[in-house]
Image (cartoon, rainbow, N blue to C red):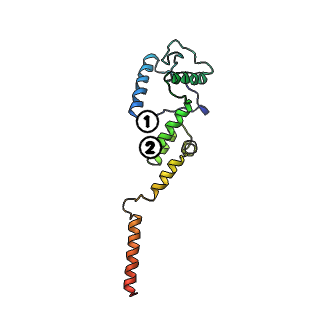
Amino acid sequence: MGVHTKNGKHATTFLLNIPDLVEVVSNWDKTIRGHLPDHFAWFAPLSRETGLFDSTIQNTGNYRDSRARKDLKEWLDRVGLPYHSPHKFRHGNAVYSIKQSQDVADLKAVSQNLMHANLSITDGVYGVLSSQDVGEKIANLGGKVAAGQVSQVELLDNLINIAMQIKQNSGT
């Protein structure tokens, strides 16, 4: 009852280390693994009425993705949350992951976790910054001083001191 992806891709997906998320997924995993043989896909049949695992469902059907979207909408409505498509959840996860990344290796790991062929796909789809993010990033660029480097203020002070010394030494 597996999942079909674009271009027949398959990979192990890793979860972000967000304790509440990991707890929910771990509990779900224990439930599913208690009902399904080891060789079955992790995505299990869910009851349309309850949203819980339903071992009586044997056939996924040809339109499993549209059924899952409808069920998700119904479940979110029941608990008073706005509907977001499964891809919106993927998008939110990707953007959050990118924002947590510290270097290119982190970005590459995020890209591979999303099963993208290369980092430029991840950047093009999920790496677009909001206007607020751009403003904050640009505003902070001028204030950063790398280890062992002189700040802009110190550099200006040094230049003024050098100019004053040259002026004193030249007698003018």
Q: Residue at x 47, y 48 (%)?
A: 104
Q: Which mark is residue 16?
A: 1
Front residue of 159 and 67: 159
x and y percentages locating residue 8 in the rendered image:
59, 31
Residue assigned mark 2: 100
Can residue 166 be seen in this snapshot? yes
SS type, badge 2: helix
6, above or below 101, in the image? above
Q: Amino acid at mark 1?
A: Leu
x and y percentages locating residue 121 in the rendered image:
58, 43
Along the horizontal axis of the image, is 104 left or right of 118?
left
Q: Amino acid at mark 2?
A: Gln
151, above or below 6, in the image? below
| Mark 1 surroundings within 10 Å by alpha-carbon count, few (fewer than 14), some (14 through 19), many (20 or more) | few
Q: CA distance from mark 1 to mark 2?
A: 10 Å
Q: Residue at x 51, y 18 (%)?
A: 46
Can residue 114 be seen in this snapshot? no
SS type, badge 1: loop
The numbered mark, 1 or 2, whose residue comes first in the sequence reads 1
Viewport quadrant of the C terminus: bottom left
Q: Are marks 1 and 2 in contact (CB under 8 Å)?
A: yes
x and y percentages locating residue 116 in the rendered image:
55, 39
Q: Residue furthest right?
A: 62
Q: Residue furthest front?
A: 80
Q: Residue at x 48, y 43 (%)?
A: 98
Classify residue 145 by image quadrant.
bottom left
Q: Residue at x 54, y 17 (%)?
A: 48
Front residue of 52 and 4: 52
